[in-house]
Structures are given as C-alpha cells and as structure tokens.
Amino acid sequence: MKAAESSFADRLLGRVRLSGLLSLAAPVVAILFAALITSIVLLATGAPPLDTLVIMGEYGVQPRSIVLTLNSATTFYLAAIAVAIGFRMNLFNIGVDGQYRLAALISAAVGGAVVLPGPLHTVLVILVAMLVGAGWASIAALLKVKRGVSEVISTIMLNAIATALGSWLLNKERLAVEVAGSNNIGTKPIAESGRVPGLALIPGTEAKVFGLLFLAIAVGVGYHVLLNRTRFGFDLRATGQSETAAVASGVNVKKMIVIAMLLSGAAAGLIGMPQLLGASYSYSLDFPTGLGFTGIAIALLGRNHPVGIAFGALLWAFLDTSSSILQLHEIAPELVAIMQGTIVLSVIVAYELVHRYQVVAGQRRVSKELASGTPPQGEGASA
Amino acid sequence: MTEERDTTAEMRVEQVERVPSKFRFTWRTLLLALGGLVLLLSFTRFVTGAVDLTSAGAINATVALAVPIGLAGLGGLWSERAGVVNIGLEGMMILGTWGGAWGAIQFGSPWAGVLVGLLGGAFGGLLHAVATVTFGVDHIISGVAINILGLGITQFLSKVTFAEMKGGGDTQSPPVPKLDPVSIPGIGEPLKSLESQHWFLLSDLAGILRGLTTNVSLVTVLAILLIPVTFYVLWRTAFGLRLRSCGERPVAAESLGVNVYTYKYVAVVVSGALAGLGGAFLSLVASSAYREGQTAGRGFIGLAAMIFGNWRPGGLAAGAGLFGYTDALQLRRGGESVHALLLLVAVLLAGVAVYQLVKQSRTQAAVFTAAGAVAVFALFALTDSIPAQFTSVTPHITTLLVLSLAAQRLRPPAADGVPYRKGQAK
C-alpha cells in the first residue's frame, strides 16, 4: 500500500507504517517531556521556567559556547561509539569508564616519555591508548567466555579497580610529576611534536575546536562501514539479534564476544585523546571522569546509529555547556543532570512505544489486506 | 541475556555429570564452615600478628559495612526473583542517602530520615517498574538511566536544600541527628580483657563476639532481621510463591490467575525501598552526614553479593558479610590486614586444590588452583604490606575472583531480565 492512498484516519489508527518519521518523533517527544519535567522542577524551586530555558539557549549559541559544545561532543561521541559497539551485540560494556581513564593515563605517560618526529608521536600515543583500552576490556571478555561471568558486573568491578590502579600509577614515585604552578600532580607533559593543534573553525572567538574532531568523525564512519558493509559486522549484528540464528549460520559466538569487547575497549581508549592531545597534554588528577556513563546514555539516545549518536552527543554537550550560565542566575546547574536523565529514560520508553505501535500497525495492515481479498505481500503468505 | 543462561545451563549439566555426589547444604555444614573459618582466621592472626583480623573493632565495622551492601543485595533479590534485573540499585541508594539526611534534619529525628530514605529509594524503584514492567524497556538500560537520574536529582536537591543550611554545602549536608548504638549489657568488659590476651582461638572468639554484641545500631538490627523476613515472605507464603513464579515463568503464573504486573510492581518498589534504606543507613548510621558519592558503588557490590549468594537470602548475607569484612579490614590498618588476608586466601586455595584432587579427581583443575595458591603465597611472602590504593578495591577483586570461580554453578530465576507483556503467547 502506498502512503499516498492512505487517509488520515488510517494513519491515526496505525494502518500505515510510519517508520522513518515515527522513529524521529520519539526523541523529539522525549526532549519535550524532559523540558516539561525541568519546568516543573524550576517552578517548584521558584525560578521562571521559560526564561531559564531561553537564557540557556541564548548562552549556548554564542561562538565560544559552540566551540566548547563541539569539543565536549567530540569526546562524548567517541564514548558513545565505544559503548554502541558492545550494544550492537547485546554486550553491556559498562567498563568504558575505567578503560578510557587507564588508557589516557598510560598513553599520556608514554607520550610524555618519548619524543618522536611529528605525526609519529601522535600516532604512538593513540595506539598505546587503544591497546591499553582493549587490554583492560579483554579481562571482562575472557571472564565472560571462559568463566561465564556477566560482563555487566565484571566491568563495574573493573572500573573500581582501574581507579585504584590509576591512583597508584599516578604517584610521584611512578608516572607522575608535579604540575607547574599548582599542587596538582600529573604525567610529564607531551612534547610539541605529539600535540594536535586546534582549528579556528568558528568565527568570532579565540577558542579553537579540537583537531581530533576529525578522529571522531573517522571513527563514526569506520563504525558504520564495519557494521554495515563487512561480513564481520553482519555476524556481529546477527549475534546481537539472535544468538541461536548466528550459531546456526556458523558464527563462533565466543570469538565474536572477545572481538567486540576488544573493539569496544580500543574505541574507549580513544575517548581521552582529544582532551589529552588537544588541550591538557598531560593526565592529571583533574582529568574528567564518568564519561563512560555519559557514553551509555548517548548511545541509547542515538539508537546506536552513527548519525543518531552524533546528534545525541551534540545535544548532551549543548546542555552541559549552556548549564554554566545558570550559576549566574542562582539556579543550580545540576538541573541539567535531571534534564539529561529524564531525556534518556523517556527516550527509551518512547522508542519502545513506537516499536509496539509499529508492530500493531503491521498486524492491522496485514489483516486489513487479508479481509479485502488482496494477497498480502511477501512473508504473510506462508502462514 | 537468555543465551548466556543457556550456556550456563549446559555447563551445569556437565558439572553434575562429573560430580556424582550432590553437595547438600544443612545446618551442620553451615556450623562446620563457620567454625572452620574462625579457626582459619585465628590461625592467620596468630601467624601474621595482624590483630585486626579478628578484633572487635574490625568485626563491628564489618557489620556496619555489610548492612548497606546486604540491603542493596536484598533489593536486588526481591526484584530479580520477580524477573526484573535491577542495576538501578545504585541510583536508588543515592536517593536514599539524600532522603535519609534530609528527613532526619527536616523532622529532627533519625527515624524520620530512615523513612524518607526508604521512600526516596521506593520512588526510584517505581520509576524502574514503570519503565520495565509497563513499557517493557530493557532492564539494564532502564537501570543505567535510573542511576544517571538518581545522581542528578540528588545533586540538584542537595544544592537546593543543604547548601542553604548552616554547616552544609553544595555536596554535603549539615551533621544529622544520630541514633545511639545499643549493646548487650555486662558482656563487653570481660570479653575485652579476654581479647587483649591474644590467645589462640579464645581471644579471637571474644573479639568476634564483642564486635557483634556491642555498639550496634538499631537500624543494623532491623536490616539483619530483614534477611529472615525476606526468606519467610518469599519462600514460605503464597504471596512469595506467586512473586517468584513471575520470575520463573510469568506466562504460567498468569494462566493460574496471578496478576504478573502487580507482583512485579510490588517487587521492584520493595526493591527500591530496601536500596533506599541502605542509602539512608550510609548517611545516618555509617557516617554523620550526607556526602556526594557516599555510596561509592555499593549498589553494584550489593548486586554482586546477591549473585554470589545464588539469588538466595542466606547466600546473599554471606556475600555481604564477606564484602563488608574486606571493606572493614582495609579501613583498619589496611596495608597490614589485607596483606595478612593473602595468607588466608593462599591456605583456602590450597584446600580447594586438595579437595579437587582427592574428592573430585580433577587433576587439571587442582594443578591450576594449586598454582594460584602458590602465587598468592609468593605475593604474601615477598611483600610486607599492600599499597593503600589497592586495599580499597579488595571487595571488588574478591567479587571478580568469587564470580569467576562460581559463576557457572549459579542459577538465576529463569525469566530474569526477560521483558514480559500481559497476554503474550510464551
């Protein structure tokens, strides 16, 4: 049935598939719902909701804020891709957080210890980070395939262990030196040759966009190609959707689990790179934490789709950046955390509802076609 | 998730074939195991001189630290027995820490704080129930979202409430009204003098007894009572049978007239309330104020304790005790105490190796375990103390070790984590 033939009532009652438009509607509804909840919270604390949201929006589109948003979004995007690789195979890599912190620390130490010509230095740091991330993730992968330990629990435990290992390594007796001009300690700064210069993409501000923005884009493209254009990607998605079907078609599921976990860990290793090679040049105590959990949220928002995740990362970064203006108006910026949490929870509910609606709509469509005597197309005939 | 269960089921079958005599858990084995453990601890204390292994202080801290883990684990038990995986326990616990402190300050009574903390956790549980039961969202995804939301709400609320109070701040509440701990009268002093003799076994028993009977909070007593209560409700009443049937085979339960949605809702809300109680315990009893990040992942460790306990209250209590104990040791001369614990682990592993070799004739596994025992012993012999950074993760490493040894023998509820819709075919 063509969309042009359907009446509005048909669409309203779900006799037509609206898959493309509907799946776009879900996040929009979720964001509106989150704005509503935020407004209620604001009202309860005595602040004008609409004005507050407008203030946030206005601050968020200033040139400097846009640069900050792009920079955070780069990091968030990498985090979400790392999580999404696992998600596509029903693997919950909650350990992205520990993987990226350990990777950033060790690669920063390696980068600070050597001086290599130009791009080689940068490539070395990035490679070390990917290896460390994958290595830390491999513990959880091996525990799962060899001992049957759920990756959810093991990666959570490994996060805590990574924190301990990190604070043990980041000590003046081992990898750390004192940061000049403060009582903070960090790894030895990476020499000029290893740094990635920022780009002045946005006019009207001094602030520069991370050069590794392109790394994030490349990772996104690579993720898309790997999953949708290679046999490996097909196997991976098949295993995620139905393990029995995958086994029947000859997929070695245990091997797939290990490879997917290693890939996810390697991607997690990249998360710290834009910040490390583009801004701080050393891993110190104040390196951002908790990015792994942000990654989970954004991967959910973007439905594990490379473009969807990009939008999710931009939205998340926009909210983070624009929240800093709230302090000036004596509103707790943590308001944004409520907003983000509500968006995630309502978006997953909305996706589920859309999915159910589509199933029901499909059933109605087939039964209507059967009743009117026209043979249903495709799969319906075999029943 | 289902696939994983299938593989564990296969492995379990193999295990049964290999081990002909089935291990049965009775009161006798329990008492024997407890006695053996005390003997082993006493031996280790005697050899290494790490007095905190069995000191009253350490045991007291163990109980205090085991309670929030155990409550989170009980929360997990309630929800997973009804078939809902609850990884949002951490977020519900965070809500409980804030609720506990706020309620106690607002109403001037610690018991009001306990109640508000309980309600805060129950609110988180309700959210999880709406998402997973009504809307059929993936349980782990919903749980992660609740963790994010719980943290956000709590940070915001503490900024709105505590920051304006005297002695409070953005991330910290003012000191809360305290609950006085209770002791069994007339027992503390004699036990204390016996403990200070450092005799083999006798002093250790005295230390353990004194730790269990003096300076215990009433909330602790309540929490410990909740374990047998949970067992009774879930395993000895019709309500509990119905609730568990929703976690094993919801379709069958529905065909017998059980309203699966209602039972799942009740289970998940109770689960949240228990986690919230654990959170309130942290801010009211274990410390004297709400602080951001106070839970420090205890919700997750509680979940691990529940898995360790094979989805049973008794096992869960043992798991919580184990994690509480390792947590307590690291607080009390951590480097020395945890170092002494290495010897104990080495002895235990050696024992397991002998068991595998003699009773089960599993030579390869025995060699593997024995190698582990030797490695741990070497670590013990070659070092004097464990760096402070590592003692703090003793519970986490223990969790990983225990799960990697035991995960294949565990049996979760059959429909755990499987979304269910009313009227579905199978």
Image (spheres, coloured by chain):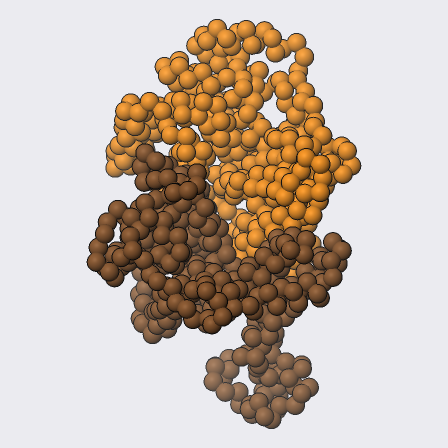
Chain colours: A brown, B orange
Question: Where A262 sits versus B276, above or below?
Answer: below
Question: Quadrant location of the C terminus of chain B?
Answer: bottom right
Estimate the x, y position of residue A323 in percent, counting from the top left: 59, 58
Q: Nearer the viewer, residue B83 or A153?
A: A153
Q: Can residue B41 be seen in this view?
A: yes
Estimate the x, y position of residue A212 in percent, counting from the top left: 37, 63
Q: Nearer the viewer, residue B27 or B209?
A: B209
Estimate the x, y position of residue A380 in percent, counting from the top left: 51, 82
Name the residue rendered at 64%, 40% in the picture. B169
A102 sits to left or right of B331: left
B116 sits to left or right of B54: right
A44 sits to left or right of B70: right
Q: Which of A327 and A248 is in front in this view?
A: A327
Question: Where B335 sits versus A15, above or below?
Answer: above
Name the residue rendered at 67%, 56% in the picture. A329
In this view, which residue lies farthest toward the right? B107
